[in-house]
Structure formats: C-alpha cells, structure tokens
Amino acid sequence: MKLDIETKKIEASIDQTGIGWLIFNNPDRHNALSLEMWKGIGDAFEQFNDANDVRAVIMRGAGGRAFVSGADISEFDKERANALQRETYGEVAGRATHWLNKFEKPLIALVEGYCIGGGLATALSADIRFASPDSKFGIPAAKLGLGYEYEGLAKLARVVGPSRARDIMFSARFMEAEEALAMGLINFIVSRDKIQDSCVEYASLVAANAPLTVKAAKAALNAWERGGEAKEVVLVKELVDACFNSEDYKEGRRAFGAKEKPVFKNR
C-alpha cells in the first residue's frame, strides 16, 4: 500500500508482511534532503506510527549511490540564508526529526554509498543500520561553516562515544564502512547483492515478535540513552505493564506450551 505523500522525492509504502518502506528519491542530487523532502519524511513517519499493521520500517536511498548525502545545499541561499529562514526551515525539519527520533517501532537503515551530514544524522535515528562495503560516512559541517544542533551531536556521541564524535566533527573526514562498523556507527556490512534481502530478513524476524514487547524495549533503551528522565521511566513501566496485560502475552504462553509459532496481534 502506497502512502499519500505530497512530494515524489519521498516514497513510502507498506508491504503485505507489515514492513514499511521509505525511499529518499532524489538520486540526481545523491538524495540530498530538500525542504519538501523533510516535510515528506514527517508525513510518512506519522502515518507509519499510526498504522497498526506496521511492525518495522526500512529506509534507503534511491539510485544506489547514496543513502542521503546531507542537506540540499542548492537551497541554502533561498531557504537558509539567514537566522530567520533557518528557524522556518528548522520547524519543518524539526517535525521530521521528531518523528524519526520518537518513532515507536523498529527502524532499519539500509545504506549504500554516501551517508553524509544530515544523512548520517538520519541514519543514526535508526535502531539498526546495514551498510554496503563501499559506503562512506561523515559530517562535513566544519567545511561549510554551519552549526550542528545539540540533539544531533548528543545522538552521535551516545552511539560512538564523545571522543570519536569529536574526531568526526573536528576533522570533517569521511570514513569507510569497516571503520564505521568498528566504532559502532553501523551494525552490519553486507554486499550490495545481498543487502536488501538481509534487511528484509531482519525486519521480518523483528516483525514476527510481539510488537508491544518490542515497543517497550525500544522505549526503555531510548530512555536510558537520554539519561533516564523520570517521566520516561514511568512511561516504560506503563508499556511493560501493557505487555503483561495483553492478549499477545496470553498467545505467547499458549504457543510456547503447545510448541507452536505464536501469532501476535499487537493488542
């Protein structure tokens, strides 16, 4: 099922197995993110989050040359030329970032080629990251003279540690996939001819599990990453309680006793 997105540069759909797909479709510019694409990302993830049948989402770039190569610099003179325009641009991009960071379901990034700047920040919002061997990662903000927001750097530091985050930001250098794997920036390196199948296989594995349990686990880990704020810890407890009060918990116990594969219904 194809989702209703205003721009053709973001393609979003849900397949019959409950896996959502989001495609950054701006290959002529290495999938650089334009303002309309940021809006499309927010619209897509809001719909994915509300769709009860979506169990996991895979996002990838069109064309095979890049996941996302950062923000579309060609728009900077028109959309981000000063602080006021930056604020307007930030509201649209901020909504998309909100949904990427607050998305309640497992999110998988399939990276082929360049994953740069805002593209790396987008990939970091994923729970699991697959990359082809020829992928390249970096944040060249220091080469452009632009500032990088706190939350983006905090996420980077949580994933790779503050020392490596400093290296990435200060040097603005590009990293190969092997180095990215060694520092925990990605989870798996898979050849181009197998990476899509590997992502689908992994997403299907996740999708077969109890959605409420996965949701509670993701919320708990996200809360821990952000320092375990009291309100988030309370929310996690509510989500855990919901697991134990669910029909899926009954189904899991039944299937385990009968030595059958459980059929979870997200309730």
Image (cartoon, rainbow, N blue to C red):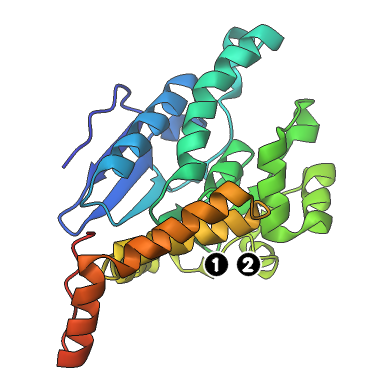
Q: Secondary structure at mark 1?
A: loop
Q: Write the residue at 16% across / 42% down.
A: 1
Q: Which residue is mark 1?
A: 187
Residue 234 appears in the figure? yes
Q: Nearer the viewer, residue 264 or 64?
A: 264
**Residues at badges 2 and 1 in contact (C-beta under 8 Å)?**
yes
- Residue 105: x and y in percent read 38, 53
Q: Residues within 10 Å of mark 2 (few under 14, many from 20)?
A: some
Is 264 above or below relative to 3? below
Is 97 above or below relative to 104? above
Q: Is residue 182 left or right of residue 205?
A: right
Residue 265 placement: quadrant: bottom left
> Going from the N terminus, do you reach mark 2 or mark 1 first?
2
Which amino acid is tagged 2? Leu
- Determine the CA span between mark 2 and mark 1: 6 Å
Residue 112 appears in the figure? no
Q: Is residue 127 left or right of residue 149?
A: left
Residue 244 placement: quadrant: bottom left
Q: Write the residue at 54% across / 20% down.
A: 91
Q: Is residue 169 left or right of residue 56?
A: right
Disc assigned to residue 181: 2
Which amino acid is tagged 1? Asn
